[in-house]
């Protein structure tokens, strides 16, 4: 469904992503795990056209080369950014409306009603400014805003960042629910245990390169993963 082949990203003379190849199959949750600065976010930004890249990214067999970010969103590839990236001085409702900026008004209304059912706390906070929400509530709003665009693949960047353990568990439930609705999910995280408990398949990235890949149960038994990422 989503295929990356030899993707490379550079910032000035520094190469952040060095020949990454990976895939997301329909109906899968796929994890991309690695330490801070390993190149995870740059991979997502390369997919959605937010940074220049070489190599090929294709979706449903059609290349995304040269496509603008809005066109990539229209095709169904939507990114939930690291750090939420909400509009703090706008209400919860206004943030959701912006998530559906490519939809017709009736579709936006329908989407908001669905998000209020899926995330009841957002209905309670609909008229509250996004910047006044707790960290967990902001993450739920960021996820809901991404879902407003009707993604076929949702790219989620560091969703656990700054969340209490209880909220991390709630977030895992949300991702499973999203996936159960037929949406593929690519989760980028430093929290390897979180990803391994969710994903059907996972990649480990170090210094801009994929160094390991496989089903999480197999990766959990790899000594390199156990010592570097699972603290065993």
Image (cartoon, helix red, strand yellow):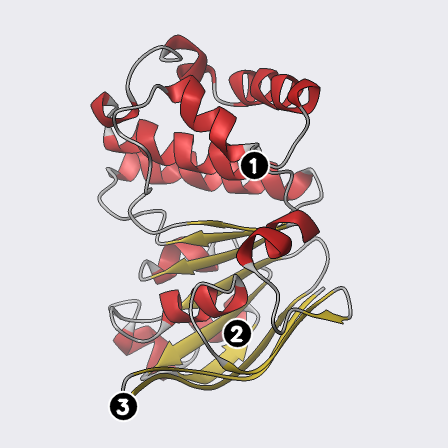
The local secondary structure at tag 2 comes to: helix
Residue 196 in picture, x, y percent from top left: 46, 60
Disc 2 packing (10 Å; few <14; some 14–19; many ≥20):
few
Give the residue number, with chain letter if any, for mark 3: 13
| Nearest to N terminus: mark 1 or mark 2 | 1
Residue 123 in picture, x, y percent from top left: 45, 12
Rendered residue at 27%/76% (across/down): 228
Front residue of this view, candidates 106 and 189: 106
Q: In the figure, 17 relative to 112: above or below?
A: below
Q: Disc 1 versus disc 2: distance between alpha carbons?
A: 31 Å
**Quarter occupied by the C terminus:** bottom left
Q: In the figure, 99 relative to 157: above or below?
A: above
Give the residue number, with chain letter if any, for mark 1: 147
Rendered residue at 51%/34% (across/down): 99
Front residue of this view, candidates 84 and 100: 100
Residue 142 in picture, x, y percent from top left: 41, 36
Identify the image quadrant of residue 179: top right
**Quarter occupied by the N terminus:** bottom right
Give the residue number, with chain letter if any, for mark 2: 218
């Amino acid at each position: 469904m989503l295929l990356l082949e030899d993707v490379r990203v550079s910032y000035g003379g520094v190469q952040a992503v060095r020949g990454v190849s990976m895939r997301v199959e329909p109906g899968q949750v796929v994890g991309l795990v690695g330490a801070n600065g390993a190149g995870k976010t740059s991979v997502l930004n390369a997919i959605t056209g937010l940074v220049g890249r070489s190599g090929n990214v294709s979706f449903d067999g059609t290349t995304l080369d040269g496509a603008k970010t809005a066109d990539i969103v229209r095709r169904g590839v939507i990114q939930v950014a690291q750090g939420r990236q909400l509009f703090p001085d706008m209400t919860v409702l206004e943030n959701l409306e912006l998530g559906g900026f490519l939809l017709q008004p009736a579709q936006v209304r329908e989407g908001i009603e669905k998000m209020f059912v899926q995330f009841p706390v957002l209905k309670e906070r609909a008229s509250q400014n996004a910047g006044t929400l707790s960290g967990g509530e902001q993450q739920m709003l960021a996820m809901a805003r991404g879902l407003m665009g009707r993604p076929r693949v949702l790219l989620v960047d560091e969703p656990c960042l700054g969340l209490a353990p209880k909220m991390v568990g709630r977030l895992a439930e949300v991702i499973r629910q999203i996936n159960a609705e037929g949406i593929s999910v690519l989760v980028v995280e430093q929290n390897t245990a979180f990803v391994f408990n969710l994903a059907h398949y996972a990649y480990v990235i170090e210094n801009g390169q994929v160094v390991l890949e496989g089903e999480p149960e197999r990766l959990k038994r790899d000594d390199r993963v156990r010592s570097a990422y699972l603290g065993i």
